Image (spheres, rainbow, N blue to C red):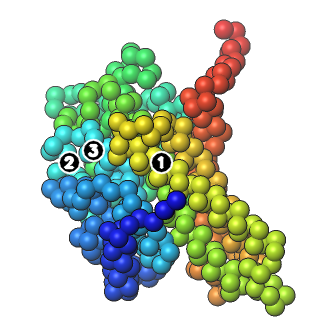
Amino acid sequence: MDLSYGPEYDDFRAEVQSFIENHRDRAPRPGADKDAPKRWQKLLIEHGYTARTIPKEYGGHGGQPDILKGRIIAEEFANSQTPGGLGGQGISMLVPTLLELGTEEQKRRFIPSTLAGDLVWCQGYSEPNAGSDLASLRTSAVLDGDEWVINGSKIWTSTAHLADWMFCLVRTEPDAPKHQGISFLLLEMNTPGIEIRPLVDMTMTPNFNEVFFTDVRVPKHQIVGNRGEGWYVANAILGHERDSLGDPNATLTRLNRLTELMKTETIDGHRAIDNPAHLDRLMKLQARVQAMRFNDLRILSSRLNPSSNAGNTKLARMITKLQATELRHELEGFGIDILGEAGLLYGKSDYLTDNGSWQTHYMYFLGLIIGGGTSQIQKNIISERGLGMPKEPKIEKAGA
């Protein structure tokens, strides 16, 4: 069996390797100026190494879909531990949703500036009484002439304190069934009536927030999709969110860094990677990362060839977020174990390795096991919708 990609792809791999060799010194590093990521993003888009298939009129590279070229780019950037393009909720979640469901005006207004890193987005979904049961949301929007008037609150809103814009779910038809009557609005974060209160998360930094809306006025045309059909848009964007939380390329990059760490850290004078127990643990992680990458290829292949007989990827997509967050948490925890006593450090210290990233990521991905749909909720979804198992029994309320 010949598993080689062929001469065309060998040449493309050499092209990517040459780009990395010649330009990796321009990639943003810790302590770089704030515009360094934007400059790197622009360079990557020009060469087609990010936003590869997004049309040029929307700020992308405008290339044709090619699964193998996409995989080669991911592999070479991961193997060289070179930063890829910008991510975040705007690029990873909103952009593909606007490409699918947005108006032409919305695409031209928001996608280019988002891809360039000039617009930062946050997601207004969860509420104090509508987390796992998101369809129970109560934040309202009432149409007053040519404006929506929004009242209510959101919680666990990641990066709201840094964001320029929010994509937000609101209830526009209060008498409709809970999965109906919801609309998807885009709103600017400096709009009068918006109050942001930071919340400290497991990493001991305020990465997410409470957001309060008091008579916030938003232009009527800043709705994505039809009025009352926001749940359809929400499900499209949640699929992109789970994919972004389960990026196999970022996981591979981290696995490669872990392998390097094991070659330099010593235990009783011996390299950690030469310890049979540690090596066995590393190999198990390598196998899980490979499985994650192949699952991602299956999903991508199905998207690019929807009429093929590649199989139903519904279940494959469902496991992405569950698999990825738990794997990253375990991987980061292994890095802490390899560091020994230094792995217990947190915050500022002269003895931190990799600027404390192992400790920070360990806590961050513990949070993501909960955020974006808890692992318990994900398992219910997989069992009921993916495997066809009976639904979880509903306990009748007392006195019903």
Q: CA distance from mark 1 to mark 3?
A: 24 Å
Vertical arrangement, residue 195 with respect to residue 11, above or below? above
Residue at image point 30% right, 71% down: 44
Q: Residue furthest bottom?
A: 269
Q: Quadrant of the C terminus?
A: top right
Coordinates of residue 381 in the picture (x, y in percent): 58, 33
Q: Are marks 2 and 3 in contact (CB under 8 Å)?
A: yes
Residue type at mark 2: give it: Lys
Q: Earlier in the sequence, mark 2 or mark 3?
A: 3
Coordinates of residue 319 in the picture (x, y in percent): 57, 43
* Most foreground residue, 246 or 78: 78
Q: Residue furthest right?
A: 268
Residue at image point 55% right, 63% down: 251
| Residue corresponding to mark 2 | 107
Q: Earlier in the sequence, mark 1 or mark 3?
A: 3
Coordinates of residue 398 in the picture (x, y in percent): 71, 13
Residue at image point 65% right, 80% down: 261
Q: Are marks 2 and 1 in contact (CB under 8 Å)?
A: no
Residue type at mark 3: give it: Leu
- The numbered dot on residue 98 is 3
Q: CA distance from mark 2 to mark 3?
A: 6 Å
Residue at image point 37% right, 27% down: 182
In which image quadrant can residue 124 be found? top left
Disc 1 is placed on an element classified as: helix
Vertical arrangement, residue 190 with respect to residue 205, above or below? above
Residue type at mark 1: give it: Arg
Q: Count neighbours of disc 3 (C-alpha within 10 A) and say few if under 14, some if 14 to 19, many if 20 or more.
A: many
Q: Residue furthest front?
A: 1
| Residue corresponding to mark 1 | 298
